[in-house]
Image (spheres, helix red, strand yellow):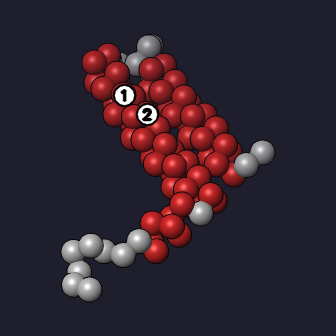
Amino acid sequence: MRPVFKIIIAYEIFFFLFWQILYYSNKEIENWFDVAILEATYTVLSTMALGFVLVYVVYISAKLTGFIDKIKKIKDPRKNI
């Protein structure tokens, strides 16, 4: 299994467990979180994690295929010849 997939799985497990802890801590204990706050927290954190994983996967894919090296070899057209 590639390291990228391990990272994705680790993030998903972490945020699933994080969500479960936040959700079930609200059940029989004093209502110290509102449901809207939990949903917003989960949405923000999971979106950040998935965005990071998406950017990381694109970067690693571009690096492995050699696309980044091709981009670095392109000359800057704004500079004088």
Which numbered marker is on residue 43? 1
Residue situated in front as seen by the camera: 29 or 76: 76
What amino acid type should be assigned to the residue bearing mark 2? Ser
Question: In the rendered image, is residue 10 in sight?
Answer: no
Q: CA distance from mark 2 to mark 1?
A: 5 Å
Quarter occupied by residue 60: bottom right
Query: Picture coordinates of residue 26 (x, y %)?
Result: 40, 19
Does 8 sit above or below residue 73? above
Asked whether the viewer can see residue 23, the reply is yes
Q: Amino acid at mark 1?
A: Thr
Label 2 SS: helix
- Residue at image x 55%, y 56%? 62
Q: Which residue is mark 2?
A: 46
Residue 23 on image: x %, y %: 45, 20
Residue at the (30%, 26%) spot, across then down:
40
Q: Position of residue 48 (x, y in %)?
A: 39, 41
Q: Report the residue at 63% width, 59% height from top.
A: 64
- Circle 1 crowding by C-alpha within 10 Å: few under 14, some 14–19, many from 20: few
Task: Answer with left or right where residue 9 lies relative to residue 42.
Answer: right
Residue 67 as seen in the image, left or right of residue 40: right
User: Please, which residue is most extreme toward the right here?
Assistant: 1
Rendered residue at 64%/38% (across/down) = 9
Compared with 26, 44 (above or below) is below
C-beta proximity under 8 Å, tags 2 and 1 = yes
Residue 81: x, y in percent?
26, 86
The secondary structure type at the circle numbered 1 is: helix
Label 2 crowd (10 A; few <14 / some 14-19 / many >=20): some
Left or right relative to 31: residue 63:
right
Residue extending furthest toward the top:
28
